[in-house]
Each structure stands twice: as C-alpha cells, then as structure tokens.
Amino acid sequence: MVNQSSGLVSRLQRGQPVRRTEISSLATFVPPRLLTNTDLEKMVDTTSEWIIQRTGIIQRHVVDPGVATSDLGKEAALEAIEQAGLTPKDIDLIVVGTTTPDMFFPSTACLVQHKIGATHAWGFDVAGACSGFNFSLSVASQLVAAGCHDHALVIGADVMSSIIDYKDRATCVLFGDGAGAVVVSAAKDPDLGIIDFAHEIDGSGGPALQMPAGGSLRPASAETVAQRLHYVKQDGQTVFKFAVRKTEDICRTILERNHLAANDVDLFVSHQANRRIITSAAERLGLDPCKVIINIEMYGNTTAATIPIALNEARETGRLKKGDLVLLASVGAGFTIGSVLLRWAI
Ligand code: UT7
C-alpha cells in the first residue's frame, strides 16, 4: 500500500524546523488468564515467598494457545487510536517493539496493520528487547517531528510465555504477556510532549540474556529443540547489576543534558524486570519513592510492554497528570539501554 501521508516531503527537506511531538493517547491490553506464584510452585521447585522477595512478582497474565503478539497489539492499538479521536486509516506509520514477533516474517507491524485496517500505514518491528518501547517511541517521534508523518502508532508487545522454559525456575517466574500502544502526533501545546531521548546498545552483554536457537546461527532442528535452546537463557546476576548501573547512568545523562535534576521529575517509569532493580536505581538517582511507579507484582516482566502498562496504571490511579515531567528508562537484552524524557500532554 502506498503511504498517502500529506507530509511525505519532510519539514527538514522543506527547510522548516522539526516540530515537538506528543503521546496523544495510551492504551494497554493483557490476556485474561493468570499465572500465579502458587501455580508456579506446582510446576518448578520454587516458593511464592522466594519469588516475591527476590522479584516483587505475585502474578502474570499469559495468553491461551493460538493468541500471538499481534493479537495483544491489535487490542491496545484499536483503543489507543480511538482515544486519540482517530480511525485506523489516519495512521501513517506503525512501529512495533517486540522480542516475540508472531513469526520471523511478516513483521508484527504488518500483521497488526492488516488486523486493524490501517490501510494507509507503513511500518516495521524494532528488536530492542526490554527497551523496545523506548526505542520504537523515539523512532516514530522523529518521523513525526520531521513532518514525514502526522500520526504514528507505537506498540510495545510481547508474548514472553511463548519463549519461556516452564521447567527453568530461574526464568519462568519472571515473565508475563501484554501490550501497550500509544499514538504519537504533533504536539498541540509546544510546552508539552516528547523532549529528548538517550539510547545505547552494548553488544558485549549478549550472552547474558538470549534465546540461543531459532535464528540463522542455529536454525531450528530436532537437536536444538531437544536441548531446549528455543527458550530464554539468562545470567540473572550479571543482568541485574548491569541494569541497576545503566538505569542510573542513562537517567543522569538525559537529565543533565536537559539541565534538569532528579527532583524535577514528577514520575519515573522504569522497565519492570525486578522490583529491586527499580528501587535501587531510583535510590541511586535520589528519586522520592512516591514518584516511582512499580506494578511488577501484577504483570511480571512483559518486556516491551512494561513501560506503557506502568504508564497507564499511573494515569488511571491519578499519579500522572497533564504537564508532569516523566522519565522513562529501560535496560534489556542486547544489552539495550533507553530513556525518554517527556511532559505528559493528555
Ligand atoms: O528484562 C530483562 C532483564 N532481566 C532482568 O533485569 C533480570 C535481572 N535479574 C534478576 O532479576 C535476578 O537476578 C533474578 C530474579 C533472576 C534472580 O535473583 P538473584 O537474587 O540474582 O538470585 P540468584 O540467581 O543469585 O540465585 C540465588 C539462589 C540460587 O540458589 P543457590 O545457588 O544460592 O543455592 C538459585 O538457584 O536462588 C535460587 N533460585 C531460586 N530459588 C527458588 C533461582 N531461581 C529460583 C526460584 N525459586 N524461582
């Protein structure tokens, strides 16, 4: 489908300054089925007490067989588009952050585009693991800022239960399934909206968190399946230490270069991988705990979906208001490191 956005010649090409962008709507979707700590106690050698103490997680949502990432993304997307006062045909671009695409190809963006009827959109997936939402938001925001597009749909969605080994107690207690979607549009108020992003990758951390088989290096075979190589493998402590240090680092970077202090932040929305990572990073930054949103207990680690799910919870519980300075931060497989700074615009 040919993209029909009126802004195909960007503001940059026309010699105009880039425009401020905003998140103009936010919606989330989690599958109804719950996987509780008590359920996991019956599946592996663990206790609910250990899981709560070491991670903060009490329950996660998981899909039923046959439900894929694009299905969760579709639900969140349709609601986000409606909230923005738009129809799917108004969407110019779809960027999906995911580690668990429905399949290698077509991309999840293509599958969502078809499912929601966004017939004027192009799009692609971003493999940023737990930074998938932050990375996707930044890319989409830049295309709207440059005037290439008016409305971009950004989705962070993962069906982690599809790549989790429910015989490995070190990983199966951590993850859940979910999706979040936002529409990114030109900012209505130039004082509100997306201010900046700071991202890094550090490929030396690859071995610490990966799914070893199923790609071009080790294509799926009877042997890779027998060796359980199509599941998440993690060196938890290495990832934990890196996540605490780099969450602090990236937040300092983005705050300092915008001449802001931690005190100025109204809401800190970190990737939800472990309660202890979030509280340690927030403490190191000197953030008041009441400015830190933690909802890992209800969802576990939903990878690219944690940030929109946490943002939405903050909004629904009255902890996020128009004009608030919001700091998003994430560290994940790769390693990927992300942060986005914004003034909440809705
Ligand atoms: O979003 C992607 C990024 N991922 C993360 O950010 C995750 C980062 N890592 C973590 O959150 C933590 O490292 C974990 C929650 C994964 C593990 O917590 P930990 O405090 O680092 O535990 P550990 O790996 O050092 O294991 C401590 C003990 C071990 O037993 P021994 O060797 O001391 O006897 C483990 O075998 O806990 C054991 N253990 C468990 N025990 C009960 C590991 N998993 C479990 C379990 N139930 N589920």
Image (spheres, rainbow, N blue to C red):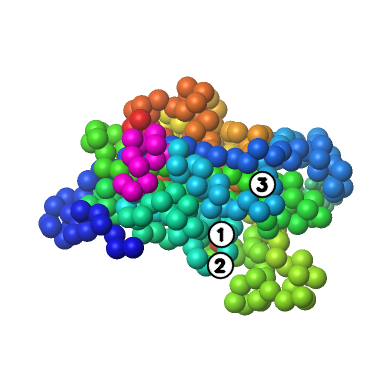
How far is disc 2 from disc 3 in space, using C-alphas? Answer: 19 Å
Q: Mark 1 Cα within 10 Å, few/some/many (few <14, many 20+)?
A: many
Residue drawn at the location 50% of the way across and 26% of the way down:
316
Q: Secondary structure at mark 3?
A: loop
Residue 63: which numbered mark, if any?
A: 3
**In the image, is residue 175 above or below residue 316?**
below
Indicate if the residue with disc 3 has its beta carbon within 8 Å of ligand 1.
no
What kind of residue is marked 1? Answer: Pro
Q: Nearer the viewer, residue 289 or 193?
A: 193
The residue indicated by pointer 2 is 104
**Disc 3 or 1, which lies upstream in sequence?**
3
Count of numbered marks:
3
Residue drawn at the location 63% of the way across and 46% of the way down:
177
Tell me: 46 left or right of 150: right
Q: Mark 2 Cα within 10 Å, few/some/many (few <14, many 20+)?
A: few
Q: Main secondary structure of the magenta part?
A: helix
Indicate if the residue with disc 2 has its beta carbon within 8 Å of ligand 1.
no
Q: Secondary structure at mark 1?
A: loop
How far is disc 3 from disc 1 in space, using C-alphas? Answer: 14 Å
The residue indicated by pointer 1 is 101
Quadrant of the image occupied by residue 85: top left
The answer to whether residue 337 is visible is: no
How far is disc 2 from disc 1 in space, using C-alphas? Answer: 7 Å
Q: Position of residue 166 (x, y in %)?
A: 78, 53
Q: Position of residue 294 (x, y in %)?
A: 58, 33
Label 2 close to label 1 by CB (< 8 Å):
yes
Quadrant of the image occupied by residue 93: bottom left
Q: Position of residue 256 (x, y in %)?
A: 36, 43
The answer to whether residue 266 is visible is: yes
Residue drawn at the location 75% of the way across and 57% of the way down:
165
Q: Assess whether residue 88 is covered by the magenta stretch.
A: yes
Residue 132: which numbered mark, if any?
A: none
